[in-house]
Amino acid sequence: MDQQIVNAIFIGSIYALFAVGYTLVFGILDILNLAHSAVFMFGAALTYTLVAKYGQAFWVACIGGIAASAFMGLVIEYVCLRPLRRRHAPPIAALISTIGLALIIVAAVEQGQPGSFFEWLWTNGSTSVAFPSSALTTGAPNVSAMASSSSLSRSGVDRWSSRACSGVSVRRLRRRPT
């Protein structure tokens, strides 16, 4: 029973991080980026691979996973989303593009089997994943979510995000001094 509580807290923390990420991206860019979770998954898979297959230290692997996720986010922004904004495409175009990107990223990670192009990514496909149960894996997502939430509330972005989600024009709010 104790392990189930730890698992619930861990998964809930991950959901909180996703919620903060979606709110931040949507509130600032006015785009609902549904590839956000796939980028997060790629970073986690890369971190796991660096530790399990290549023997890197956990912190080095975490930095590598975060850097790879950030780079992937920049590529998505510059290659996929900015051209749509420049053409004044309707919001549904960005939504469909990011759904497609999410499917491609997930499929690429799942193809990591011996003999494939993504062989470097997994030790034994997705069956080799085992989550450690420690205070670090349970506490780190909670601390990260609380820090993100705190910094957003201090910056005023949370006010714009909540208004954007409720249908208030954020662009109109940005022009007026608060």
Image: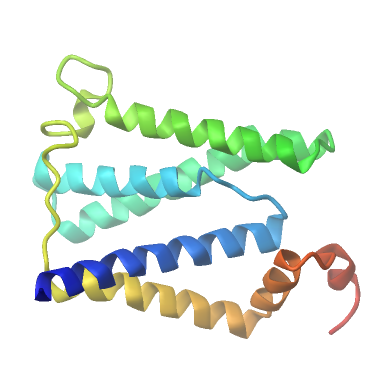
* Residue 145 figure quarter: bottom left
Query: Which quadrant is home to the N terminus?
Result: bottom left
Compared to 98, does 28 lie above or below? Answer: below
Question: Could you say where residue 112 lies in the image, as x and y percent from the top left?
Answer: 23, 26
Seen as rendered, the residue at the extreme front is: 1
In the rendered image, the quadrant that contains the C terminus is bottom right
User: On the rendered structure, is 104 left or right of 172?
Assistant: left
Number of numbered discs on residues: 0
Left or right of residue 108: residue 91? right
Q: In this image, 66 relative to 148: left or right?
A: left
For residue 150, above or below residue 83: below
**Colour basis:** rainbow
Residue 68 on image: x %, y %: 38, 45
Q: Residue at x 27, y 56 (%)?
A: 62
Residue in front for this viewpoint, 52 or 100: 100
Vertical order, 82 against 173 (above or below): above
Q: Give the answer, above or below, for where 56 lies relative to 18.
A: above
**Going 48% across and 37% down the picture, which residue do you hit?**
102
Q: Residue at x 74, y 66 (%)?
A: 164
Q: Is residue 97 left or right of residue 105?
A: right
Q: Residue at x 79, y 64 (%)?
A: 167
- Quarter where residue 144 is shown: bottom left
**Picture coordinates of residue 11 (x, y %)?**
30, 64
Residue 74 pos. (x, y %) = 55, 44
